[in-house]
Structure formats: structure tokens, C-alpha cells
Image (cartoon, rainbow, N blue to C red):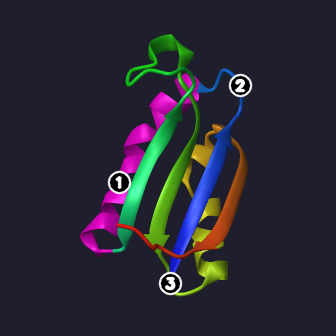
């Protein structure tokens, strides 16, 4: 089943985000290589493709997991959690309808 992982950043966490980014992307690429990643990306803090120093306000990941506890455990182990980037993470079942 698909699960949406929506995370909100702590204010002023851009430096921590950039430091943890390689490890974060490695986990996402592993999901992608397994064919389980459907969508992933950050929320720019301002209305811009490249928010620069404004940074990001959170992230969203949509991926396939066997069940909700597994999806939550995966989200809890994200390097952004350990680095203090995320202040809140929500994991919910997701049903893709379109496209």
C-alpha cells in the first residue's frame, strides 16, 4: 500500500538539512531502486524553485510499504529526524487516483 509521509521542518534548520541531505537522498534512492518510491521532494519556504537562504518548510514522500507501522518506522529513521531538521512527521495511508 502507498503511504504519504509529510514532515514539517524546525525553523532555521537549513544548515542541518544540507548536512544530512546525502544520507536522506541515499534512503530515497534505495526506495526508488526497489520500485517503491512514487514521489518525493521538499516544500520551499517561499514561492520559488530555489528558495536560497529561505530554505524549506518540510518535505513530502509517497512510497509503498507493507503496512503503516513499517512506514512509520522508516520515517522515524530518516536522517533529517536525527539531524533535528523535522519537528513533526505524519504518516498516512494514501490512495493514488490520478493520473
Q: Out of 65 and 81, give the one closest to the viewer.
A: 65
Q: Out of 40 and 14, give the one closest to the viewer.
A: 40
Give the CA separation, mark 1 to mark 2.
24 Å
Q: Out of 2 and 10, give the one closest to the viewer.
A: 2
Disc 1 designates what residue?
A: 26
| Labels 3, 1: front one | 3
- Residue 93: % across, % down: 62, 75
Q: Which residues are magenta?
A: 14-35
Residue at 60%, 79% (x, y): give it.
70
- Residue 76: % across, % down: 65, 61
Q: Dot 2: few (<14), some (14–19), or many (≥20) neighbours within 10 Å?
A: some
Q: Considering only vertical position in the picture, is 12 above or below 32?
A: above
Q: How many marks?
A: 3
Disc 2 designates what residue?
A: 11
Disc 3 designates what residue?
A: 1
Magenta highlight: main SS = helix
Left/right of residue 61 with respect to residue 22 in the rendered view: right
Residue at 57%, 25% (x, y): give it.
45
Residue at 43%, 45% (x, y): give it.
41
Image mark for residue 74: none
Q: Considering only vertical position in the picture, is 70 above or below 21?
A: below
Amino acid at each position: 500500500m502507498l503511504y504519504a509521509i509529510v514532515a514539517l521542518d524546525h525553523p532555521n534548520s537549513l544548515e542541518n538539512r544540507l548536512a544530512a541531505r546525502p544520507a536522506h537522498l541515499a534512503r530515497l534512492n534505495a526506495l526508488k531502486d526497489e520500485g517503491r518510491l512514487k514521489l518525493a521532494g521538499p516544500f520551499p519556504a517561499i514561492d520559488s524553485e530555489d528558495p536560497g537562504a529561505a530554505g524549506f518548510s518540510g518535505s513530502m514522500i509517497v512510497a509503498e510499504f507493507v503496512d503503516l507501522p513499517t512506514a512509520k518506522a522508516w520515517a522515524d529513521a530518516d536522517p533529517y529526524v536525527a539531524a533535528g531538521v523535522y519537528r513533526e512527521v505524519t504518516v498516512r495511508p494514501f490512495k493514488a487516483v490520478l493520473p
